[in-house]
Image: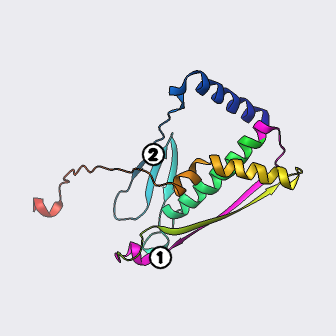
Amino acid sequence: MSEQVKKAVVALKQAVTENPAAARAVFRATTVSDADSLSTDSSIRGFGVRLDEPADLGGTDTGPNPVEAVLAALGSCQAIVYRAYANALGLRIDRVEVEAKGYLDLRGFLGDSKYPAGFDRVTFATRVVSPESPETIRNLSEVVEAHCPVLDILRTPLAVSGSLEHVRSSDARDAA
């Protein structure tokens, strides 16, 4: 597995060096919410992901909620970047665990403009199991924190835009 990761990272780096335009990537997800439920189904590269809200927030608790998914994305990205860089550098990593916590005041979601609707703070703790020296792992941690895409997304303001298309549905009450 580590040789496969190393080859993939080296090949990607070479491709981008030879053709800088190849560095631009677009990631996509399509999400649908049907019927009278807070659950959603997302399609990402053919993978299905169900998100929902816990019952105390009006959902049916059939999956994690979106803010929990953000925390899972951060933990997953951290672990992946640790693995990728460790493999590229020839370091042995036996296990990576990331516990992420997001702090959110629900008053923002509930309409009080004095509070943000999203997280006001995110923390994470990473545990790396490795025979490497503590200094080597600290140095690796600095590299990971500098190059983890999801951590960068959370830390750096970015332009976000959206659009709306309204498609009128036929309503049984209108037909009566």
Please tell me which residue is depicted at 55% across the width and 69% down the height of the picture: 121
What residue appears at the point 17 percent right and 55 percent down from the top-left corner? Answer: 170
Number of the label disc, if any, that sits on residue 105: 1
In this rendering, would 51 be left or right of 175? right
Q: Earlier in the sequence, mark 2 or mark 1?
A: 2
Of residues 3 and 91, the one nearer the viewer is 91
Provide residue 108's location: percent of width, then percent of height: 40, 74
Q: Mark 2 points at which residue?
A: 29
Instruction: Specify the amino acid type for callout 1.
Output: Asp
The magenta region covers: 87-112
Which quarter shows the C terminus? bottom left
Task: Say left or right for 135 vs 176.
Answer: right
Separation of marks 2 and 1 at Cα, in angstroms: 27 Å
**The furthest residue to the top:** 18
Q: Position of residue 128 (x, y in %)?
A: 79, 56
Can I make out residue 95 in this image?
A: no
Relative to the observer, which residue lies in front, 114 or 84? 114
